[in-house]
Image (cartoon, rainbow, N blue to C red):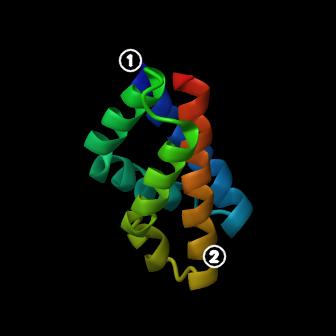
C-alpha cells in the first residue's frame, strides 16, 4: 500500500470519529462525503502531499491550499439526513484540519 493510500485510509477513519463528535452519529454518511471529497481532489492532494514530503511545500502552504478546497466539500449524504448548516460547516472545518493532520503525520 502506498503512503497516499495510508493517508486516505487515515482520513476516512478520522472522518467517522469527527462525525460522531459533530453529529452524534452519521458515520457512514460522513465517510461517503469524505470519500467523495478525496476522490474529487485526489490529483491535487497527490501533488501537494508529494511536494510536502519533498519539503517543497511548507505546512502553512499546504494548509492554505486545503482551505481553498473547503468549498469543494459537498455534504450530500449528510444533508439528506437533515444536518443543520452550522453542523455541516463544523464538519467541513474539522475535515480540513483532519486532512492536514493526517498528511503531516504520513508525509513528514
Q: Is residue 48 depicted above or below 83 in this figure?
A: above
State the CA–CA distance, disc 1 to disc 2.
33 Å
> Which quarter of the figure has residue 96?
bottom right
What kind of element bears circle 2? helix
Q: Which numbered disc, 1 or 2, marks the residue that appears first in the sequence?
A: 1
Q: Residue furthest top?
A: 1
Report the quarter where the N terminus lies: top left
> Which quarter of the figure has residue 37?
bottom left
Q: Is residue 93 depicted above or below 96 in this figure?
A: below
User: Residue 67 at x, y = what percent?
Assistant: 49, 59
Question: For residue 87, which numbered disc appears in the image?
Answer: 2
Asked if residue 72 lies left or right of residue 7, the reply is: left
Give 60 or 94, whichever is nearer the viewer. 60
Asked if residue 13 lies left or right of residue 25, the reply is: left
Asked if residue 25 lies left or right of residue 51, the reply is: right
Q: Residues within 10 Å of mark 2 (few under 14, many from 20)?
A: some
Q: How many marks?
A: 2
Answer whether labels 1 and 2 touch (C-beta < 8 Å): no
Q: Residue at x 52, y 36 (%)?
A: 58
User: Residue 69 at x, y = what percent?
Assistant: 40, 60
Give 66 or 99, whichever is nearer the viewer. 66
Report the quarter where the C terminus lies: top right
User: Residue 22 at x, y = what percent?
Assistant: 69, 66
> Which quarter of the figure has residue 32?
bottom left
Q: Residue at x 53, y 34 (%)?
A: 103
Residue assigned mark 1: 2
**Residue 29 shows in this picture:** yes
Q: Residue at x 48, y 43 (%)?
A: 62
Q: Residues within 10 Å of mark 1 (few under 14, many from 20)?
A: few
**Residue 13 shows in this picture:** no
Asked if residue 84 lies left or right of residue 35, the reply is: right
Amino acid at each position: 500500500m502506498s503512503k497516499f493510500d495510508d493517508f486516505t485510509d487515515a482520513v476516512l477513519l478520522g472522518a467517522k470519529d469527527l462525525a460522531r463528535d459533530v453529529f452524534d452519529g452519521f458515520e457512514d454518511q460522513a465517510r461517503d462525503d469524505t470519500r467523495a471529497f478525496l476522490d474529487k481532489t485526489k490529483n491535487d492532494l497527490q501533488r501537494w502531499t508529494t511536494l510536502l514530503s519533498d519539503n517543497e511545500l511548507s505546512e502553512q502552504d499546504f494548509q492554505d491550499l486545503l482551505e481553498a478546497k473547503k468549498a469543494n466539500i459537498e455534504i450530500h449524504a449528510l444533508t439528506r439526513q437533515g444536518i443543520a448548516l452550522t453542523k455541516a460547516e463544523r464538519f467541513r472545518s474539522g475535515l480540513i484540519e483532519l486532512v492536514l493532520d493526517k498528511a503531516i503525520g504520513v508525509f513528514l
